[in-house]
Image (spheres, helix red, strand yellow):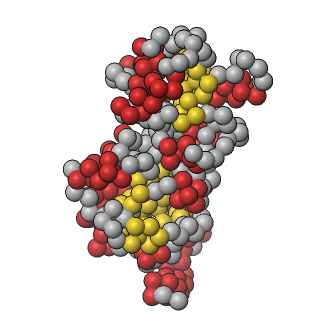
Amino acid sequence: MNRAADRCRLGQKAAIGRGQTTLRRCALTCLLLAALVAVGATHPAFAAKSLVHKSAPEFVVTDLNNQTLDLNAYRGKVVLLNFWATWCAPCQLEMPRFIAWQSQYGSRGLQIIGISMDDDPAQVRSFLEKLHLNYPVAMGDEKLGELYGGVLGLPLTLLIDSCGKVRAEYQGATRLTVIERQLKILLLHP
Amino acid sequence: MKSKLIGRIGFAAILLTFVTLDIQAQWTPPSAAAAQPGSALTIPQAELIQPEALNHLLQKAGPQKPLVLQVGSHVLFAQAHIPGAEYVGPGSQPGGLQALRDRVSSLARNQFIVLYCGCCPWNHCPNIEPALSKLREMGFTNVKVLYLADNFGAGWVNKGYPVEQGR
């Protein structure tokens, strides 16, 4: 059992011991999050197979800086996993905000991860040079896409809690205030 | 105690109403008025084909079957594509347009061709209009564009239409 998993387990135990008031608050938060997800699920632009309420599939890839990117290593953090591409206009609108969030909320436990669904890594590198990204990006492929239920439209962003469970999925051009609100809830109640 | 609980439920209901309205406000219907040159919004309705109609056409055997070309992402194509469709490359890039030209140059100009992409929401698709313009420029007269409002997943796969996998 690694440290991150221990932290996750201990965190859950601590939450149980916080008393009835806290539990009621958590239940209310969960109810709200579940309702948000249910509303999102009826949105016309949803992924082929939703992973909400399921464990985020594990993957290990090499990022564009030749570093190992292991999703499991981020257990204990709230992860925003963003599938994007250089030719995707809504993705390009989101990325500067993701950079700001990584700076703003990184110390509070947020980790943003980018997966480019482009065909050509050279094109991605050249694109990222202009952005001064502060979070890791790796190239995706059809295997990773299928692992995540089919990435059949971009952008696709998943909000993963500190225990590795997918809490929300955002397909297509999504209002960023909605994502930010939900990730702030998770950072407050991991 | 009871009134406290009712108060909390009321508060959650009001919050949920605001959030619901906020999420619904994300959906902006495509508007031709907002169309930029090269945008899919500039494609006339008459040149569009709906997923249901294309699926119906593809189920029928015979010479009326169109040549279906995907002009978007290869990674997305490899995950799922319309059975029999061919990948030619992104219409927004010179390499993709050259591959499209190479694929169709020997065909009769009245060949029935259906283009599709589905990479992004329709009003943001960078590929479909340049590919259609290329075929028009080459003199093709029987071209339709598959209308996928959100993306290929939502507009085709989730509707239960058949797909194939692989490059």
Q: In which quarter of the image is the N terminus of chain B?
A: bottom right
Q: Where is residue A176 in the image (x, y as percent from the top left)?
A: 37, 50
Q: Going by the image, does B164 lie left or right of A184?
A: right
Q: Is residue B27 above or below residue A124?
A: above
Residue B2 sits in which quadrant?
Answer: bottom right
Q: Going by the image, does A91 lie left or right of B10?
A: left
Q: Quadrant of the C terminus of chain B?
A: top right
Q: Which residue lies furthest to the right in this view?
A: B61
How many labels, in total? Answer: 0
Say if residue A32 shows up in the picture: no
Residue A99 or residue A119, whichever sits in front: A119
Q: In this view, does B9 lie above or below A177?
A: below
Say if residue A134 shows up in the picture: yes
Q: In this view, does A30 lie above or below B62?
A: below
Q: Going by the image, does A91 lie left or right of B63?
A: left
**In percent of the image, x 64 and y 29: which residue is there?**
B51
Q: Residue furthest front?
A: B106
Residue B26 or residue A63, whichever sits in front: A63
**In percent of the image, x 22 and y 57: which residue is there?**
A132
**In percent of the image, x 41 and y 28: which residue is there?**
B97
**In percent of the image, x 54 and y 33: which residue is there?**
B70
Q: Position of residue B99 (x, y in %)?
A: 45, 31
Q: Where is residue B107 in the image (x, y as percent from the top left)?
A: 56, 17
Q: Where is residue A6 in the image (x, y as percent from the top left)?
A: 49, 88
